[in-house]
Image: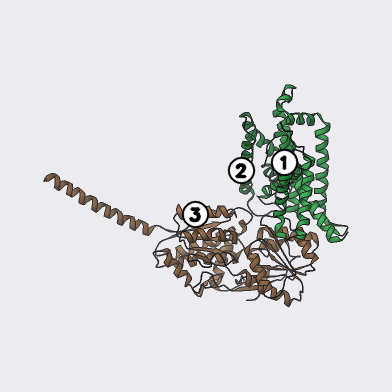
Amino acid sequence: MSSIAAQLILNGIIAGAIYALVASGFSLIYSIGKFMHFAHGAVLAVGAYMMYTFAVVLHWNFYLSIILAVLASMCAGQLMNLTVYRPLRKRKASSAVLLIASISAMTFVNALILLAWGADVKSIPVTNPVFEVLGARITLVQVCIIGVSMILLACLWFLMKRTTLGKAMRAVADNKEVAQTVGINPEWIYSQTFLIGSFLAGVAGVLIGIEQNLYPQMGVQLAIKGFTGAIIGSLSSVPGSVLGSFILGLVENIGIWYLPSGYKDAIAFVLLFIFLLFKPSGLLGVKAREA
Amino acid sequence: MKKTLVLLSLLLLLVACSGQQQSAQSVQQSKEPYQFGAVLPLTGTNSFYAEFAKYGIELAVEDVNKAGGINGRQLQIIYEDSGGDKAKATSAAQKLIDVDDVDALLTVTTPMGGAIAPVAEASKMPFIYESATNSFAVNKTYVFKDYPDATEMCSLLMKQVKKDGHEKVALIGTNAEFTLLCKQGAQSVAPLTSFETYTGGETDYRTQFVKIQNSGSTAILLSIFAGDCPHAYKQIRELGLNVTIYAPFQGLACGSGDNTKANPDLLKGAYGADVAVNEESTDPAFVDFKTRLVARGWTTQITGSAVTYDSIRELAKAYEGCDNKLCVTDHLRNLNDYQGVSGTIGYHGDQIVERAVNLRKFDGSKWVVVQS
């Protein structure tokens, strides 16, 4: 394989892994909560900025900073669930209302980030050696991103298929009322879902913050790409959203090899449009049974 | 009869009082400060531009007021944040015009200039934008562009590229008009081997750089917003691109202080082009400006602050002796050979400023003017 082709594919995989980190948490929360939690991007940004604060501003141990940053994301996500979404769920708010609330929450958190850390681009300096693979170049952080997205996917699969919590989450996703009758507390399940989803966002925020630098809108851009990847793969399937994200990353990067590079976003949205038109349930989604 | 006399007296009293009130209001109005509206990307990825613009503006306001103001009236600035978003910029400009009733508008960067120009022209509001794109001011009466041309900068850089012996040259830039103007300027000297763009806000340009690498280019023109330069430099380093960098808008973009400090290794042999401000100048007015700027610890973006400083001073000067906005635009248009802290400025009967550009070379730690 030529080194250029290898680099292109690798670029696509790296981009896909970044989108997959975002899409997995997004998709998990959608599949259980049945609404689009766009503020997932803001939770990711919180993780990135807390990592910057602990590791760069306060000069704490790098690995301790990672743990604390992820915990901070989990707290931010859970806080959103308790203060924004739970009160709305109690009022039997529709998915559309929850979506609007999530956009508001995202805007609010972005404004807080701006206030606290300012608007300039920040970076988390790390020793980041470069490796050559089949003539293509990849950094250690990029390898970690690809590896972590695979490991997290595997862990999520295990959680959902092999644990009691996973079974309870699937039960609530299938039918909340029936789940309640067998003693499952939906609100407790939603709490766990947000904790796990925000954990994924925190991990994504830390890795992406190191890889791409930090800026206040980073969560918004990533949420859009993660959402696109999730739609392609299947919004209600975490493996599907991960697969869709990798497909998106590859199509974007290989696409602009042949087309003018300014069309990168257009490629992503054309792909999204094609799937919405011909396979709205996504690659791994199941078509809803008609009544 | 008595009643009529009383009523008549009351009427006369009322007329006299309203007359006095009107003249009091006129006196009050004439004492009210002039207000210029500044729509800046105070937040968002382009906030870097707002930072130095604000510092230049504030120094200009201080100096205008210290010199007695405009027509005996003080000057105030009202800031509005565009967040780097065109829709927000348009709303902000509309609010400044309709609600705050400002006397002039100012903005920085191409997207903001493009968004506000139609609003300013329709509202007959004198408006200066600082961007490398001319088209927003063409065929306008109230819209003025106060920054050198991207075409000229890139043409100057391309000449240096050829002088340095590079046969294959690439240009990568934000998907905006100033990048197309840079391409035009570069290609007026020699053809480009590769031309790549990215949408503003994007952070992954790896594939674009791979295409440039594949083209065999040994020189690269970076027509990129300052906030995107850290991403570009990171990816150039990671992909191991062996290229010499040529940076249009050097002081305000990829050759800015922070970008230079973080990437001196990548800037070996680099050239930049920007508005012809020699930051080592010993001109007393410039030295005073620079000293005051740095003493306040505000910024090291002297060039950018100097340009906005002069834009405010130009507007203030244009308002001298004018009682309407059309007069202001006539004064601006006929501003020739005005000595600002950022050099000689002249509109020469046009909406687009003529400002000199100069070439700078990176000497390992800072940018040094090599040619004007």
Q: Which mark is residue B312?
A: none
Q: Is residue A291 above or below residue A138?
A: above
Q: Is residue B95 toward the left or the right of residue B179 in the image?
A: left
Q: CA distance from mark 2 to mark 3?
A: 25 Å
Q: Quadrant of the C terminus of chain B?
A: bottom right
Chain bearing tag 1 is A
The chain letter of the green chain reads A
Chain bearing tag 3 is B
Residue occupied by mark 3: B94
Residue A120 % position (x, y): 65, 54
Q: Is residue B275 above or below residue B102?
A: below
Q: Residue at 24% across / 52% down in the picture?
A: B15
Tell which of A262 and A82 is nearer to you: A262
Residue occupied by mark 1: A26
Q: CA distance from mark 1 to mark 3?
A: 38 Å
Local packing at callout 2 (Cα closer than 10 Å; few below 14, some 14-19, many 20+) is some
Q: Is residue A280 above or below residue A138?
A: above
